[in-house]
Image: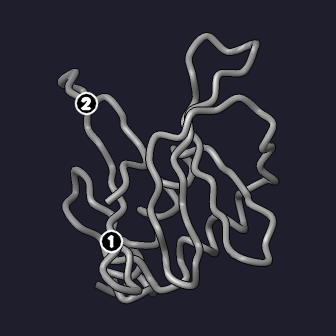
Amino acid sequence: MLKIHEFILPSGELSSVFLRRDGAALTLLGEEGELSLPIGGLRAVMLRYGAPFDAEAVSDTQATLELDGDARLRHVRHLAGYDVIARDYLVYAEPGLEPVCALATNVAGALRHLGLAAERGGDGSK
């Protein structure tokens, strides 16, 4: 299981969002409970919103989640020279593909949307 995002609730408490691998399936866990993600959903989100990852940039790997097909998702923290607080990014890598990264908050939001759509049957009919 990999923590991919964290935010502050109106009560002031921290709330974490996790991604869990169950075989080939991925599940998003957070305040709303568990949301099953469509197969290939994480890859699609990362390729859509990700940008090439600068391996030379100073970043600290927080954790890694191994995925099917020798792919992997890393949670990294990066503090740019102009930032006051470090930002969390997710880095997706698979064989034959240049690693891509995206802000963790953006990926968590997109995955939440996919999970909710899948729960409703994909067409919002529920």
Q: Which amino acid does label 1 sit on?
A: Thr
For the residue labelled by badge 2, is the local secondary structure a helix, a strand or a loop? Answer: strand
Q: How crowded is mark 1: few (under 14 residues within 10 Å), some or many (20 or more)?
A: many
The image quadrant where one finds the C terminus is bottom left
Rendered residue at 44%/47% (across/down): 63
Q: Nearer the viewer, residue 87 or 110?
A: 87
Rendered residue at 48%/86% (across/down): 39
Q: Name the residue under label 1.
A: 27
Which image quarter: residue 58?
top right
Vertical placement of residue 4 versus 69, above or below: above
Q: Name the residue under label 2.
A: 14
Vertical placement of residue 55 versus 83, above or below: below
Which image quarter: residue 25?
bottom left
- The numbered disc on residue 118 is none
Indicate left or right for 19 with 101 as reference: left
**Residue 60: x and y, percent?**
57, 33
**Residue 65: x and y, percent?**
44, 62
**Residue 33: x and y, percent?**
19, 61
